[in-house]
Image (tube, helix red, strand yellow):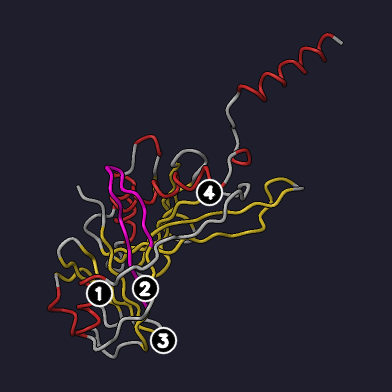
């Protein structure tokens, strides 16, 4: 009986004083700023490469407990490199991440893989998704969905870099470009503005005078115009353009 009373007392004290120790006790809203900050760190780590932020993905229906549904939030960026140098990029990113993230690159059956821990149960991952394309991401794992996550950037303009790319390719700007933003480690923010500009281009060569080439392939071309990285991708049925501004310093 005495042991039961002691155990009940310790349980009462722990519930009221101990911080959460597992991800199921931390909500999606608590994880959103951690994920955004982690992606900002990844942007800073790929400085000098051709990259673009990808839209956030929210997956509903996972199980927090046998009786409670949850959601998973994933944010990240794609980086274009020379085919064969994907592992070199992953290792460079791992070296530039904070030491307490314990980032490392290992080779498995699907090729090189970066793994790191951004804290607050947010996992960082890097993998090769195609020849010359590396995807870096930060994910919350399944959590109680106490908010409805959305990007709220109304009235986004295409900006002068995308306007110049559209002009030389003979395309018009669509009415609603998509913008994705993450905070940078030292303040400010990194951003990608992207749009679909009609059927895939027969040639991306007209873009070459607009900046210093970073990637030059028949169906993908990326260049730097001042601080902005512009990416043109005609590998699918549609021409996709993106302009990304990274983290200063």
Percent across and percent down for residue 95 are: 30, 44
194 or 237, nearer to the observer: 194
User: Mark 3 Cα within 10 Å, few/some/many (few <14, many 20+)?
Assistant: few
Q: Which residue is mark 3?
A: 237
Where on the picture, by quarter, is residue 118? Answer: top left
Q: Secondary structure at mark 4?
A: loop
156 relative to 25 in the view: left or right: left
Write the residue at 34% across / 51% down: 42
Separation of marks 2 and 1 at Cα, in angstroms: 10 Å
Q: Is residue 33 magenta?
A: no
Q: Secondary structure at mark 2?
A: loop
Mark 4 and mark 2 in contact? Answer it, CB < 8 Å: no
- In this picture, which residue range is highlighted in magenta? 180-195
Separation of marks 3 and 1 at Cα, in angstroms: 20 Å
Name the main secondary structure of what is drawn in magenta. Answer: strand
Q: Which residue is mark 1?
A: 162
Q: Is residue 6 above or below residue 192?
A: above
* Front of the two marks 3 and 2: 2
User: Mark 1 Cα within 10 Å, few/some/many (few <14, many 20+)?
Assistant: many
Percent across and percent down for residue 99 are: 35, 36
Mark 4 and mark 3 in contact? Answer it, CB < 8 Å: no
């Amino acid at each position: 009986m005495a042991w039961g009373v002691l155990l009940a007392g310790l349980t009462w004290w722990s519930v009221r004083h101990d911080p959460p120790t597992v991800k199921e006790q931390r909500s999606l809203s608590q994880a959103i700023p951690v994920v955004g900050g982690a992606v900002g760190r990844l942007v800073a780590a790929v400085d000098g490469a051709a990259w673009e932020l990808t839209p956030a993905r929210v997956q509903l229906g996972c199980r927090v407990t046998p009786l409670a549904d949850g959601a998973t939030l994933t944010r990240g960026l794609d980086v274009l490199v020379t085919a064969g140098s994907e592992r070199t990029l992953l290792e460079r990113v791992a070296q530039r991440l904070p030491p307490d993230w314990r980032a490392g690159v290992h080779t498995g059956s699907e090729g090189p893989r970066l793994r790191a821990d951004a804290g607050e149960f947010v996992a960082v991952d890097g993998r090769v998704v195609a020849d010359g394309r590396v995807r870096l991401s930060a994910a919350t794992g399944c959590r109680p969905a106490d908010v409805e996550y959305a990007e709220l950037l109304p009235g986004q303009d295409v900006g002068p870099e995308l306007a110049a790319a559209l002009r030389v390719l003979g395309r018009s700007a669509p009415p609603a470009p998509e913008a994705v933003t993450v905070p940078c480690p030292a303040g400010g923010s990194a951003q990608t503005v992207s749009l679909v500009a009609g059927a895939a281009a027969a040639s991306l060569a007209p873009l070459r005078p607009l900046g210093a080439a970073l990637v030059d392939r028949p169906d993908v071309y990326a260049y730097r115009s001042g601080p902005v990285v512009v990416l043109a991708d005609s590998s699918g049925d549609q021409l996709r353009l993106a302009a990304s501004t990274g983290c200063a310093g």
